[in-house]
Amino acid sequence: ALLAFKPELIYISAGFDAHVNDPLADLALTTDDYVWITEFIKTIAKESVKNRIVSSLEGGYHLPSLSESAWAHIDALAH
């Protein structure tokens, strides 16, 4: 569906409040899950928007997990 839509860029609302350690959610994602999602989005961006991605930090309330996940997300975007 995304490829059919033909966006000009992909905007990531990078919230980390679904992390397993976050007190407000029960989704149980890990830092590795966020890396996988970021890499998947990069693959789509390469195919559809010439690698144009904007990522904005949105949330996360367990500060150690937020820090770890945000860093891993940025690292995955950079490599």
Image: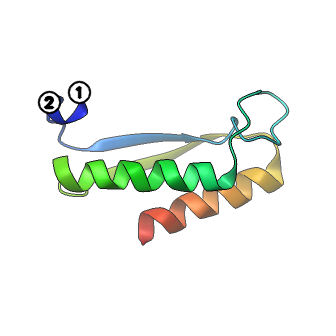
Q: Residue at x 24, y 44 (%)?
A: 9
CA–CA distance in space, label 2 to label 1: 5 Å
Q: Residue at x 17, y 42 (%)?
A: 8
6 to the left or right of 28 = left
Q: Residue at x 14, y 35 (%)?
A: 6
Residue 12's tag is none
Residue 4's tag is 2
50 to the left or right of 43 = left
Q: Position of residue 21 (x, y in %)?
A: 83, 42
Q: Amino acid at mark 1?
A: Ala
Say what secondary structure mark 1 lies in: loop
Q: Amino acid at mark 2?
A: Ala
Q: Is residue 65 visible?
A: yes
Q: Between 1 and 61, which is closer to the camera in this rendering?
A: 1
**Above or below, comparing residue 8 to residue 50 in the picture:** above
Q: Position of residue 74 (x, y in %)?
A: 52, 62
- Label 1: few (<14), some or many (≥20) within 10 Å? few
Q: Position of residue 71 (x, y in %)?
A: 62, 63
Q: Residue furthest bottom?
A: 79
Q: Residue at x 17, y 47 (%)?
A: 48
Q: Is residue 52 visible?
A: no
Numbered disc total: 2
Q: Quadrant of residue 4?
A: top left
Residue 1's tag is 1
**Above or below, comparing residue 25 to residue 28 in the picture:** above
Asked if marks 2 and 1 touch (Cβ < 8 Å), the reply is yes
- Label 2: few (<14), some or many (≥20) within 10 Å? few
Quadrant location of the C terminus in the rendered image: bottom left
